[in-house]
Image: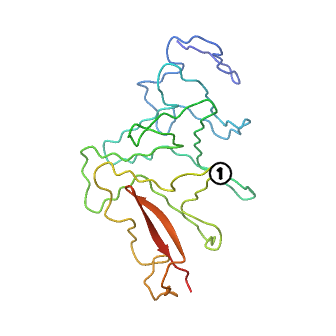
Amino acid sequence: MSLYNLKKGQAIDNTNSDLKDHGIDFSGSSLPVSSNVLRGTSIVPTRVSGWVCFTGTLSSQSAYMDYFSLTTEGTEICYGRGSFAFAESGADVAVILGSQTITRMNSGSTLATASGSPLNGAYAAQFKMLFDGATIESGAITAVACFLYQANVTDVSNQQSSILQLSVDSGDVQNIFHINVGAGALAHYLFNVSEAAAPFMAFGGDNEPNAASADLGIRCMVGASEYWIPLYINT
């Protein structure tokens, strides 16, 4: 028995309905080979909100906006969420983003004290790498995030190209980076570069500074003490 018997072009309309259960439930279903639960190809969005749009207001409980979980039990790879933006031949764009996350606190809202927890706060995104008794083989690599920059054929070295682009659009922030030492230890190294290459070079490979005093400095806080990293003009 079908809940809906739709003709081609008809829409599922549950506007202002009082649903008694999940609106659409595929629990326990098996997919045929090379199939998706929901699929739409060659569909041109006609709204800024794109292909899917849900809005709502929390009033009685905390919740995710959406929740996905995929478990691997063998050698199969879980790639996580895939979000891809393409600019094809003929495109001429000033902005293209593979993903965008924005957290906004409007006038009248309040950000409560973090109570000493680094997880509490207002963030546009939060990432966590969790090992819970897992085995890590020698030579394995792990990090909270992995950033890759790939420029095929095109030379971007003379453009403003970066691994990270940081900007303060308004106001004044206290720190560019804040590191919380919550486990009693931090890390062995601030940087671990696989081999000497620009901008990490041995003195003498360029015009190394020879001034008696620094020209500029980077201000840092370690604990309750303030320190300076000296900078010298490359002559």
- Nearest the camera: 221 or 160? 221
Colour scheme of the picture: rainbow
- Nearest the camera: 132 or 208? 208
Q: Residue at x 50, y 54 (%)?
A: 175
As drawn, is 67 to the left or to the right of 106?
left
Q: Residue at x 45, y 81 (%)?
A: 201
Q: Position of residue 9 (x, y in %)?
A: 71, 24
* Number of on-image labels: 1
As drawn, is 100 to the left or to the right of 226?
right
Q: Secondary structure at mark 1?
A: loop
Q: Amino acid at mark 1?
A: Asp
Q: In which image quadrant can residue 74 be found? A: top left
Q: Quadrant of the C terminus?
A: bottom right
Q: Which residue is mark 1?
A: 169
Residues packed near mark 1 inside 10 Å, few (<14), some (14 to 19) or many (20 plus)? few
Q: Residue at x 49, y 58 (%)?
A: 147
Q: In which image quadrant can residue 46 be found? A: top right
Q: Residue at x 65, y 70 (%)?
A: 159
As drawn, is 175 to the left or to the right of 132?
right
